[in-house]
Image: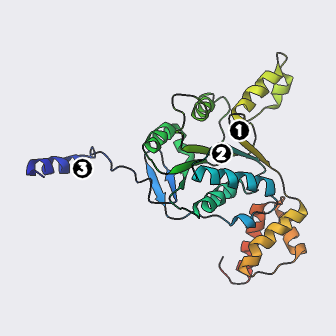
Amino acid sequence: MDPLARIAAALERMAGIAPPPPADWLGAPAYLWTGTGPRAVPSIEAPMLDQLCGLDVQKAAVAENARRLAQGHAAHDILLWGARGMGKSALVRASVRAAQAPDPAALALVQVATDALAALPDLFASLHEVTGRRFLVFIDDLGFAEGDDVGPRHLRSWLEGGVEARPAHVRLAVTANHRAILARQAAEQDDPLNPRDAIDDRLALADRFGLSLGFHAASQQDYLAMVAAYAGPAGLAFTAADALEWAKRRGARSGRVAYHYVTELAGRAGRAL
């Protein structure tokens, strides 16, 4: 390079005005989108699919959708909603990891930081330039503040037909505590004009997802199966009474509570998971 050009390039870098290097969207199984660029994640941390118990219908649907996306077939945007701790985000990660098994380069998971939603169009623009790989953009625990009508409108546009819609080789996976995603108020039921309109408008956002699956609190039997699925591979013994007492003290039976219980078992045994 010409000496003057080298000096100019060095000055630009020192001043912080040099353009960033292009993102490498082909070298990692997963990425975190920070709003200013991607950060590569070297491995996807997730349980095996067969460890997710009590979710047979949801597991089959999400895993099949990820497989289709990885193979370049038609696939849905997905919304997983319902009870906390029941494995919604774990199922997304586990399904992507399973879909990567035949060909790790076919599919990547891109998790969007909660404060980076406004930069999703920049993410889509960056992914639009990538060929030969598909992407599942993952937004975990999505929720909009009361009165926020801009965020939901943008999400509708990203899902369907807007000028900022996600590229054809990209799909969205969203988890939320409520099917409507937006918070619902009891006052909606008392609106004398037309309460159904308000409810329909909120659910219209959920209707944009081709695959919408509910997650509900675990039964006692399913909870004990979850504990066994985590404890078995680790060689940890437990009693049903002790596992149920752990759940009772936490006021819930879920996959998350089951995993916390197995973590406690490992700690008691002086073991690492």
Asked whether the residues under the numbered discs 2 and 1 touch, taking CB atoms below 8 Å apart as contact, a structural biologist would say: yes
To which residue does mark 1 refer? 181
Mark 3 or mark 1, earlier in chain: 3
Tell me residue 62's x, y (percent).
70, 52
Rounded to the nearest angstrom, the CA distance separating label 2 from label 1 is 9 Å
How many numbered callouts? 3
Q: What residue is drawn where x is 77% and y is 33%?
A: 184
Residue at the left extreme? 3
Q: Is residue 112 visible?
A: no
Of callouts 2 and 1, the N-terminal one: 2
Q: Is residue 148 visible?
A: yes
Quarter of the image that includes the C terminus? bottom right
Instruction: Characterize the local packing of mark 2: few (<14), some (14-19) or many (20 or more) Cα atoms within 10 angstroms.
Output: many
Residues at marks 3 and 1, CA–CA distance in whole angstroms = 43 Å
- Considering depth in this image, is 181 or 97 the residue closer to the camera? 97
Residue 27 got which mark?
none
264 lies left or right of 161: right
The percent position of residue 52, horizontal first and vertical second, equals 75, 63
- Mark 3 residue type: Arg
Q: Nearer the viewer, residue 88 or 146?
A: 88
Quarter of the image where one finds residue 247: bottom right
Q: Is residue 65 left or right of residue 70?
A: right
On screen, residue 166 above or below 68:
above
In depth, the one of 71 and 56 nearer the eye is 71
Mark 2 is on which residue type? Val
Q: Nearer the viewer, mark 2 or mark 1?
A: 2
Q: Which residue is mark 3?
A: 13
Q: Which residue is mark 2?
A: 174
Q: Give the left or right position of residue 35, taking residue 61 as reference.
A: left
Which residue is at the far bottom?
270
Q: Amino acid at mark 1?
A: Ile
Q: Quick check: 155 above or below 37?
A: above
